[in-house]
Image (tube, helix red, strand yellow):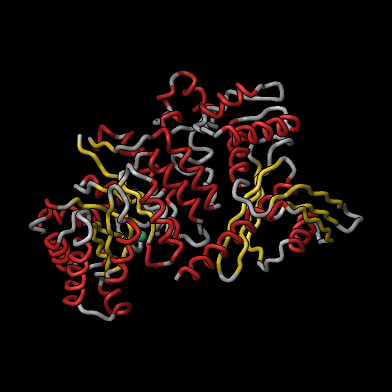
């Protein structure tokens, strides 16, 4: 069976989504999970775009050794040099060069003619090739480019050394049959096409990214560029989990395979959602809350008789934990550790002790501790690992006849304990104001939402916030059975990320 290569661009195109800024540690953690998922290629970033991106790509290249690590570069010598600089220590490095080829981009954006584009594309591929044997080229906005010109560009870049040619539907304009025709035509019109892998990169502006990618695969493409949960520029990219599960579930139709370990899909999806702060819509294919839930009586009846009646995929295949085992306050450390292992977590002794203490605290407040609670609890513990400021204590007083008041105690740098109090329009406002008095970093709250992790009045609440400072958005998350405490944790998380981001930017300025 033929294999389709899975090229994951969560850390590059995915991170380009408005409001999805990730720090270096978070990118590294996602890259390690993508390695567990067994993606073939990780596009780790766009090194010339910022010092932070450069550092993240370099760390990933050093520490993630199984997949190919790819760095993006636009068709300029300095971008290609910088990309190589970032990935030169990778075990399997790749440089991905892109340049627009469509008339709208040439006329209105670049002010260049086709000869100049052809010349720059081949020259930059040659330059990249002088560093590294594995080179990808993307004619940006390919789906709106004149066909004859695409053939010419593709043939020339392969001649210059490109080993993968990626055909992007940059603006999500293509329709499956039309896009499939374009891909198929490359095999007939480009003389040297068999010297390169044909790849596709589809955006979801018309909700067709997955359909376009799959049609391209049916017509001969053997690399698909995609992102976990489909995040990406504007409406996003083709969703990795949907591409992989379509190929897996419909082997009878595609007669193809991917190297992905599908049981890692759910964990990857949760991790990316948690780190980017982009919640997964309930009815999202494969990884949504409702994807394997059957509501109608007729469906439930069929399912009880035989799963095949209404279930085309088994939830365990994508690694969705079964919620049948419920822990409680009488559960011991052994049961907790086993449950963590079954959920795919392997924590070191220290983290495990902290997580177990939090589990016991939670079990005191909540009768049943489900898999979802455990996931939320572990995510909360992980968030506190690299904190500059840690919440020690919060107390609020509020009600319809009193002025909401909050007292906050924090542990700051050097383990110094800081405390202050403030009034607010509500308990969360009062807590945030008290925190602001202690951590004096100007910022603006731009988003605030609360969700319950499970059903029930004793459920854990998960708070997601976004704050803005100096034009940069930072996401924060917090979980607790008390939503005021969860809100405080989310704000602390966002502020800690803001401080870490500022510190990293200052460090890179002094290094320059
Ligand atoms: O959408 C696009 O065209 C891209 C390229 C850089 C491949 O992201
Ligand atoms: Zn893109």
Q: Position of residue 24 (x, y in %)?
A: 48, 55
Q: Is residue 260 above or below residue 417?
A: above
Q: Residue at x 42, y 50 (%)?
A: 230
Q: Nearer the viewer, residue 350 or 133?
A: 350
Q: Ligand 2 quadrant?
A: bottom left
Q: Nearer the viewer, residue 248 or 485?
A: 485
Q: Nearer the viewer, residue 304 or 292?
A: 292
Q: Residue at x 60, y 22 (%)?
A: 335
Direction from residue 299 to residue 242 in the image, left or right: left
Q: Toward which corner of the image does residue 45 lie, by quadrant?
A: bottom left
Q: Position of residue 116 (x, y in %)?
A: 19, 77
Quarter holding the C terminus is bottom left
Direction from residue 164 to residue 509 in the image, left or right: right
Q: Toward which corner of the image does residue 160 lie, by quadrant?
A: bottom left
Q: Residue at x 71, y 62 (%)?
A: 439
- Kindly tell me whether residue 161 is visible in this rendering: yes
Q: Residue at x 68, y 66 (%)?
A: 441
Direction from residue 410 to residue 93 in the image, left or right: left
Q: Nearer the viewer, residue 50 or 104?
A: 50
């Amino acid at each position: 069976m033929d294999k389709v290569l899975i090229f994951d661009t969560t850390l590059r195109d995915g991170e380009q989504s408005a409001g999805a800024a990730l720090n270096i540690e978070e990118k590294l953690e996602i890259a390690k999970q993508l390695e567990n998922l067994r993606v073939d290629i990780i596009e780790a970033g766009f090194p010339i775009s910022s010092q932070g991106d450069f550092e993240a790509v370099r760390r990933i290249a050093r520490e993630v050794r199984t997949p190919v690590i790819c760095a993006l570069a636009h068709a300029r010598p300095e971008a290609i040099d910088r990309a190589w600089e970032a990935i030169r220590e990778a075990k399997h490095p790749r440089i991905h060069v892109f340049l627009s080829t469509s008339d709208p981009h040439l006329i209105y954006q670049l002010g260049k003619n086709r000869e100049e584009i052809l010349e720059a594309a081949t020259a930059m591929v040659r330059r990249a090739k002088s560093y590294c044997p594995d080179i990808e080229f993307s004619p940006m906005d390919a789906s709106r480019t004149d066909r004859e010109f695409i053939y010419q560009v593709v043939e020339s870049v392969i001649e210059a050394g490109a080993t993968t040619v990626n055909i992007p539907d940059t603006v999500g304009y293509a329709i499956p049959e039309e896009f499939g025709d374009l891909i198929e035509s490359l095999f007939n019109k480009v003389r040297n096409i068999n010297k390169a892998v044909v790849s596709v990169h589809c955006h979801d502006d018309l909700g067709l990214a997955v359909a376009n990618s799959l049609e391209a695969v049916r017509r001969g493409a053997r690399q698909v560029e995609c992102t976990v949960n489909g995040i990406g520029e504007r409406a996003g990219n083709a969703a990795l989990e949907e591409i992989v599960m379509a190929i897996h579930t419909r082997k009878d139709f595609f007669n193809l395979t991917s190297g992905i370990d599908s049981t890692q899909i759910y964990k990857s999806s949760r991790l990316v959602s948690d780190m980017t702060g982009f919640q997964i819509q309930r009815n999202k294919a494969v990884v949504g809350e409702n994807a394997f839930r059957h509501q109608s009586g007729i469906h439930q009846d069929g399912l009880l008789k035989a799963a095949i009646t209404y279930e085309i995929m088994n939830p365990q295949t994508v690694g969705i934990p079964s919620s049948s085992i419920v822990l409680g306050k009488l559960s011991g450390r052994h049961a907790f550790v086993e449950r963590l292992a079954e959920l795919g977590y392997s924590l070191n002794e220290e983290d495990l002790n902290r997580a177990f203490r939090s589990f016991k605290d939670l079990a005191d407040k909540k009768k049943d501790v489900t898999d979802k609670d455990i996931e939320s609890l572990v995510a909360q513990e992980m968030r506190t690992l690299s904190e500059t400021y840690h919440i020690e204590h919060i107390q609020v007083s509020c009600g319809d006849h009193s002025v909401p008041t909050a007292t906050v105690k924090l542990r700051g740098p050097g383990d110094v304990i800081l405390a202050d109090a403030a009034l607010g329009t509500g308990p969360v406002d009062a807590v945030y104001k008290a925190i602001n008095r202690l951590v004096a970093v100007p910022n603006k709250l731009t988003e605030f939402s609360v969700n319950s992790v499970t059903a029930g009045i004793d459920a854990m609440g998960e708070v997601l916030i976004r704050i803005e400072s100096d034009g940069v958005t930072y996401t924060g998350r917090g979980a607790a059975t008390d939503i005021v405490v969860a809100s405080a944790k989310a704000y602390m998380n966002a502020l800690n990320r803001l401080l870490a981001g500022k510190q990293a930017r200052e460090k890179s300025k002094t290094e320059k």
